[in-house]
Image (spheres, rainbow, N blue to C red):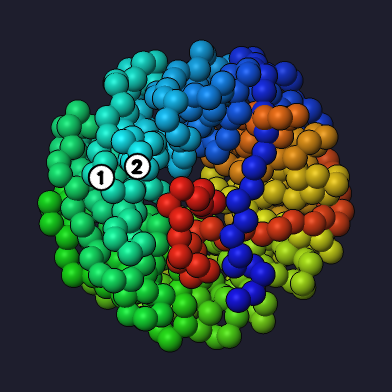
Amino acid sequence: MKKLLYVLLISVFAVSVSHAFADSNPTGFTNPASISSPNSNSTLPQLVASGNNVYVGWVYDAAGKYGVMLAKSNDGGASFGNNINLENINSGAMDNLRIAESQGKVYAVWQSFLANKSSVVFAKSDDDGATFNRAIGISDISKDSAFPQLAISNNHVYVTWIERTTGDVTNVIFAKSDDDGATFGMPTTITSHGGNSGIPKIFATENHVYLIWEDNSEKNFDVFLSSSNDSGTTFGTMTNVSNDKGDSGAPQMTINGNNVNVVWMDNTFGNFDILFSKSTDGGVTFTKPVNVSGNQQDSGYQQFVVVGDKIYVAWTSAISDKNYDILFAKSTDGGQTFGTPINISSNPGASGWPQISVDGNNVYTSWVDNTAGHYDIYISKSADDGNTFEAPIDVNSGTSGSWYNIMATSSNTVYLAWQQANPGSNDIMFVKSTTFVPEFGSIAPIILVISIISIIAISAKNKLRFTPRF
């Protein structure tokens, strides 16, 4: 299997704290500042922006204790309040945090360690992130559970994850709350077979809930989808979205009105390509897949955004044995066709882990690269709806490595968070921009080991406490 698919677990380091941010540097962003607590190793940030509120969450370990932290800004990221500890234990590391916000309430789900098992834990804030209720376990503590995902719709809270059973078999599990997270019903097993089901994704709107995942129940890996039209009470027959002879995985899903849009990695054509398909009947049937990347090298770790009939896709593409770049393609006809891919990073080194966000006619793509000899966070902007992109800029331009970039946009403001290496620890860094005026030329050569952890089952049998990057 080609280099692009190998899993690399990256460890980085951090300390220090700051609650106010300096004026913008020449990149158009504020100077990077730490929002994590001192004397702790903070990793794997999550970022949500809603109006003037910005929420950043992460996991940490300090002095033998492990926890989950959340910090909130109510002035658009200009300053952050005190960090809130959602869970603090000394029995095992936290992992795979996900956060969501809806109508002044903040929800968090993560992977904890209870009764010597990896478990899924949930916590909620009713006061816009000022305080949180006591965390509760929602998975079966007699089995290993991991990789939780979270969706909110009205007073319903939906969580899905992977559960490991006898023989190292993994299945997709689903649980829901109909009282806004106060209590959860018994978990429901979505898949039940002798194969492996990969990390699911979840999307909810009104009374519709959609689950998508990868598994090899039909010998090769395919992408499957199942949906519920009664707020998660029952799920319909599984639909094989990819349904081809190759291995398919790392699916991403977005719902746009009645359309279910899916992109995934697929090696049917001899190398891994990015494929797109759409359902207009709620996921019962899907269109013939369209090859978005369409090249002779491996492509993977795709992210996408759908706005009306426009579909924006960014991914990592292997250019040569040592060169990876960030490519972008757009469809203006609902995914029937895609334009020729644009090489956004375009350098003789390598770039990886893209994030993509759309705000009006502005399209933003951020990623990780080590132009300066270590990993930095880069970003490029298109002001003409993805037709052309400005030269990439180095947002943090530090002296130590940075990874796990997370991006959000809201009201013409761009927010970025990442984990940054300091001696012996990791720190969670944050910047924002309301101007974003790039002043850097083309980026220099870089070297990056690409991680496609979303395809856990394609490369090898998954280990549930591994951390995916997606």
Q: At numbered mark 1, what does the secondary structure look like: helix, strand or loop?
A: loop
Q: Nearer the viewer, residue 96 or 407?
A: 96
Q: Amino acid at mark 1?
A: Ser
| Mark closest to the chain's N terminus, 1 or 2 | 2
* Measured Cα–Cα span from mark 1 to mark 2: 7 Å
Dividing the picture into quadrants, the one containing residue 129 is top left
Q: Which label number is shown at residue 331?
A: none
Q: What residue would you read off at disc 1?
A: 142
Q: Residue at x 67, y 50 (%)?
A: 367
Q: What residue would you read off at disc 2?
A: 117
Classify 323 as above or below 416. Answer: below
Label 1: how many Cα within 10 Å (few below 14, some 14–19, many 20+): few
Q: Amino acid at mark 2?
A: Lys
Label 2: how many Cα within 10 Å (few below 14, some 14–19, many 20+): some
Q: Does the rendering let one see residue 210?
A: yes
Marks 1/2 in contact by CB < 8 Å: the verdict is yes
Q: Residue at x 50, y 32 (%)?
A: 59
Q: Residue at x 50, y 84 (%)?
A: 268
